[in-house]
Image (cartoon, rainbow, N blue to C red):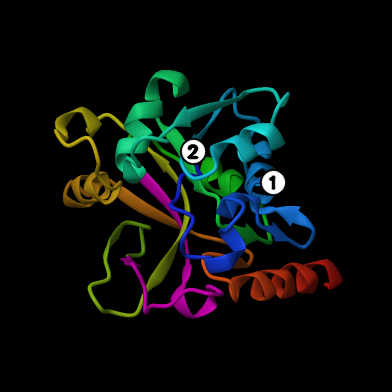
Amino acid sequence: MLFAAGFGTRMGALTADRPKPMIEVAGRPLIDHALDQAAAIRPRQIVINLHYRPEMIRTHLAGREKIAFADESDAILETGGGLRAALPQLGPGPVYTLNSDAVWTGTPALSQLASRWDASRMDALLLLLPAEKATGYRGTGDFVMDEDGRIVRAKGTPGYAYLGAQILSPKRISAISETVFSLNRLWDIAIAEGRAFGVVHDGGWCDVGRPEGIAEAEALLGKARNV
């Protein structure tokens, strides 16, 4: 699942006439950068949720195979509610989820996750970077990780930033009664049961959630091309 449903507010004037996933970085919309990451694992189905100016994304992706849409025009469901609404289109079993407001260098994000996924002991596998290496990230870390890769909340301790890419088992999602909720709820369950793990990304990442992130992202991509 590719998360693309937002309110169109964080990027200010840049989203006056377009949704954030259609903002260009290095000459290409963010949604295309995200789809490049997804293409590496050859998914049988991609579901993209939509809210603000959804017709622009639909038009941009018209004709592409294996892409479906989850319409949240009436009300944004947040990440957890959005995933649950999309599950009938995604099918059973664990799913990849990916945010659409970032760029990446290095091994494709979802390929790294696929190489480490172990359903026998994991319900969540998150892609991470040390907080100080995550471009555009404003914090000291979301998680800390032990020598086995198991993660818990950082709670103010310096640690790893979550990069918006994961493999997640939705098997506990039916136990959540709310319609609108965050995937943090499923992470907390997995953490409590010792079934939440992390993988450290082998390349760079830049958040493009704010206007200044565009130049930072283009610098990151340019540096990778020149190596």
Amino acid type at mark 2: Leu
Q: Residue 179 sits in which quadrant? A: top left
Q: Is residue 93 visible?
A: no
Residue that numbered label 2 is attached to: 50
Q: Against 201, is 117 above or below?
A: above
Residue 129 lies in magenta, yes or no?
A: yes
Residue 71 in the figure: left or right of residue 61? left
Residue 63 placement (x, y as % from top left)? 73, 23
Amino acid type at mark 1: Asp
Taking the spot 46% from the left edge, 23% from the top edge, the residue there is: 90
Q: Earlier in the sequence, mark 2 or mark 1?
A: 1
Residue 37 in the figure: left or right of residue 53? right
Quarter of the picture holding the C terminus: bottom right
Query: Are there few (<14), some (14-19), or many (20+) residues within 10 Å of tag 1?
Result: some
Query: Are there few (<14), some (14-19), or many (20+) residues within 10 Å of tag 2?
Result: many
Taking the spot 27% from the left edge, 71% from the top edge, the residue there is: 154
Taking the spot 60% from the left edge, 29% from the top edge, the residue there is: 43
Q: Is residue 44 visible?
A: yes
Q: Nearer the viewer, residue 122 or 173?
A: 173
Residue 198 placement (x, y as % from top left)? 40, 56
User: How far, Cα to Cα, is label 2 from label 1?
Assistant: 15 Å
Q: Nearer the viewer, residue 119 or 162?
A: 162
Residue that numbered label 1 is attached to: 32
Residue 137 placement (x, y as % from top left)? 47, 74
Q: Secondary structure at mark 2?
A: strand
Residue 141 lies in magenta, yes or no?
A: yes
Camera-nearest label, 2 or 1? 2
User: What range is drawn magenta here?
Assistant: 123-145
Residue 141 placement (x, y as % from top left)? 36, 73
Label of residue 56 in the image: none
